[in-house]
Image (cartoon, rainbow, N blue to C red):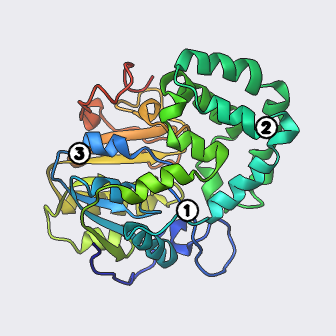
Amino acid sequence: MLGDVHTPKTAAETLWTTGRLDSSNGQPQLLFGRMYEDAEIEANAFPRGSRVFAIASAGCTAIRLSEDHEVTAVDINPVQLAYAQRRAQGAPRETGAAERMMQLGRNAFPLVGWTRQRLETFFAMHDTKKQLTDWRSTLDTQRFRIAFDAVTSHVLLRLVYAPKFLEQMPRRIGPVLRARMERCWSLHPNAANPYARALFLGGDEQDDAVFRDKRRGTVRFACADAATYLENCAPGTFNSFALSNIFDGATDTYQARLIRAMKRAAAKDAVAVIRSFVEPDLNLPANYAAQDRSPLWGIVQVTDVARFSLGLNGSSYAPRSPAATHIKITNTKFLASIPPGS
């Protein structure tokens, strides 16, 4: 079921306002056909029956959380929001700008010796030790590393991404992403990892059918800037926040404004899950990036909203005190048996 849709009244100091990944002045686009964020992090972090504020994006997280929570999903991009609404009604997945760019990379896989059959075999594996061995011996070749590091260089990424987005990424993002891949293969069985499969193999019709058939509750959608929406909510409206990586590509001023709006709209003991592409500071506690089955993220922070603060220098999400991120995810069946931040 769907709720009201509102039009944003103000422009946000964030690149998400444009509805584009590039720096052109064109019309807003569908950016993401699916979300590459493991919604089980949020599902395990949020108390059952929460009032959840979520960034809509492709709708995946909001729809997953609606099984057990009351969800409001907000997006400033009207094209993206309309797509998330269609997905909530059971519409099939569509291809966004991000997926088109990733497909260009997949088209080059044969040049580094990666065949479709070889990847299908790898992503059907159940044993993490065998996965890691297979990755290192047959897929993570010198030819792949050279090619991957070249296509993920800032020189080439500037052709498709706005400069502000690239400011959030490590200068040598290729080696960083490859390290995150290894971390993922060592912890999560590929056969039960739709996020990794989607990144490397593209659309998965079987996974899409399961998504459409899942039990879902009510999601109220609103086309709005996140900070503006929260500023107009009554205090205590939400006790859980699924913020995706909204802080990536935002100005320091907007980051601070959004945090103030979150705290104003948050109930007592509210929890937030925040992702980022950036590499974390060494002293960042409660980083669950390793537990996220998507190999993209440098930071997946589970935090107490009331005491959360963001490093506003564009380089880290370091809280000002270790106590700022004390929330513990208690579903040990889901979490890998390693300490947060490993």
Q: Please give the name of the residue rendered at 64% of the width and 33% of the height, measured from the top-left corner.
A: 176
Q: Amino acid at mark 3?
A: Phe
Mark 2–mark 1 Cα distance, whole angstroms, equals: 25 Å
Q: Is residue 310 visible?
A: no
Mark 3–mark 2 Cα distance, whole angstroms, equals: 40 Å
SS at mark 2 in the image: loop
Q: Earlier in the sequence, mark 1 or mark 3?
A: 1
Q: Amino acid at mark 2?
A: Thr
3 to 90, vertically: above or below: below
Residue in front for this viewpoint, 20 or 232 = 20
Give left or right: position of 213 versus 296.
Answer: left
The numbered dot on residue 32 is 1
Answer few, some or many: residues within 10 Å of disc 1's Cα (few below 14, many 20 plus, some between 14 and 19). Answer: many
Kindly report which numbered mark, 3 or 2, lies closer to the viewer in this rendering.
2
Q: Please give the name of the residue rendered at 26% of the width and 71% of the height, measured from the top-left corner.
A: 231
Q: Earlier in the sequence, mark 3 or mark 2?
A: 3
Q: Are marks 2 and 1 in contact (CB under 8 Å)?
A: no
Number of numbered labels in the structure image: 3
Q: How far across and down, in percent of the image, does residue 1 sit?
A: 27, 72
98 to 44, vertically: above or below: below
279 to 230, vertically: above or below: above
The numbered dot on residue 46 is 3
The quadrant of the image that shows the C terminus is top left
SS at mark 1 in the image: loop
SS at mark 3 in the image: loop
Mark 2 sits on what residue?
A: 115
Q: Amino acid at mark 1?
A: Phe
Give left or right: position of 308 versus 39.
Answer: left
Q: Please give the name of the residue rendered at 67% of the width and 63% of the height, measured from the top-left corner.
A: 162
Q: Earlier in the sequence, mark 2 or mark 1?
A: 1
50 to 288, vertically: above or below: below
Answer few, some or many: residues within 10 Å of disc 3's Cα (few below 14, many 20 plus, some between 14 and 19). Answer: many
